[in-house]
Amino acid sequence: MTAPALRFDGVAKYYESEGTRVAALDGITLDFAAGRFVALVGRSGCGKSTLLNLAGAMDLPSAGEVWIGGQAASRLSDGQLTALRRHRIGFVFQFFQLMPTLPVVENVELPALLAGLPGAREKALEKLRWVELESLAGRYPHQLSGGQAQRVAIARALVNSPSLLLADEPIGNLDTATGTVVLELLRRAAREQGALVVMATHSHESTQYCDRVVRLRDGHVESAG
Ligand SMILES: Nc1ncnc2c1ncn2[C@@H]1O[C@H](COP(=O)(O)OP(=O)(O)OP(=O)(O)O)[C@@H](O)[C@H]1O
Ligand SMILES: [Mg+2]
């Protein structure tokens, strides 16, 4: 049997704050299959971003284990974690986080260059075609609309063909029509590229685009879809 694309096994994440321990996540056990578009919902502070950061090996759990593509994150060295993030994982953020000093095409190719992959420019142009923004390859981020910037960010997140695409409120800063375009792209990333796409969202409507809704409450799974 193939391993799930992502597995949380009894995961907790604690933060110390003014001498007290805050459990951002507690007892999270979840399996995620490849090729799915999953919504992560729940009130502000319920642990969505914390879960995405653990899924993306940006952070390690305080207890339990996060399995990314069959690899236990806590057993990897720093170098292995960096390689995992660079090759297997793409991130999309609410505020796009494009590099302002680089033109669009260089923003998109940057993860391919960092991963040392050949053909970075071609890969970048291919992904820009995929989000239908190849014509804007030479522009700078400040010359883009919010929706265009997010599509560029999606192209960048997909440039290394990751198996895991993590999106933290990707439509939080967009109007409904523009958000719909972004949601369609995320859904296609799951369908056409076979990625597991996990999206934290406050938009109830956006969950209609997803195959599954995982609801968190105070660091626990309230329902897993
Ligand atoms: N670095 C940190 N230090 C201390 N506490 C933290 C830290 N990061 C998150 N927390 C706490 O962990 C809990 C979960 O935070 P998290 O950011 O994961 O929530 P969220 O569901 O993403 O919220 P939002 O919808 O507002 O983005 C919150 O109580 C938060 O205050
Ligand atoms: Mg958050």
Image (cartoon, rainbow, N blue to C red):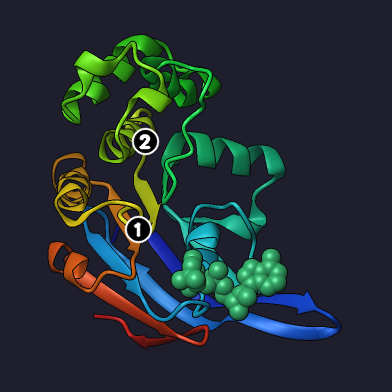
Q: Which residue lies under the disc numbered 2? A: 153
At x 75% / y 84%, what residue is drawn?
21
Mark 2: which amino acid? Answer: Ala
Q: Which residue lies under the disc numbered 1? A: 172
Frontmost residue, 148 versus 195: 148
Residue 97: assigned label: none
Instruction: Find ligand 1 in the image and state its quadrant.
Output: bottom right
- Quarter of the N terminus within the rendering: bottom left
Q: How many marks?
A: 2
Asked whether the viewer can see residue 196, the reply is yes
Q: Position of residue 153 (x, y in %)?
A: 36, 35
Instruction: Measure the alpha-carbon separation of dots 1 and 2.
Output: 14 Å
Mark 1: which amino acid? Answer: Gly
Asked whether the viewer can see residue 62, the reply is no
Dot 2 surroundings within 10 Å: few (below 14), some, or many (20 or more)? Answer: many
Q: Position of residue 224 (x, y in %)?
A: 30, 81
Q: Position of residue 101 (x, y in %)?
A: 53, 18
Residue 11, quarter of the rendered image: bottom right
Up the image or down, 141 lies above or below 212; here it is above
Dot 1 surroundings within 10 Å: few (below 14), some, or many (20 or more)? Answer: some
Up the image or down, 92 lies above or below 221; here it is above
At x 18% / y 44%, what residue is drawn?
185
Decide if residue 50 is on the left or right side of residue 13.
Answer: left
Frontmost residue, 29 versus 51: 51
Frontmost residue, 3 versus 126: 126
Q: Position of residue 38 (x, y in %)?
A: 27, 64
Label 2 secondary element: helix
Point out the frontmost of discs 1 and 2. Answer: 1
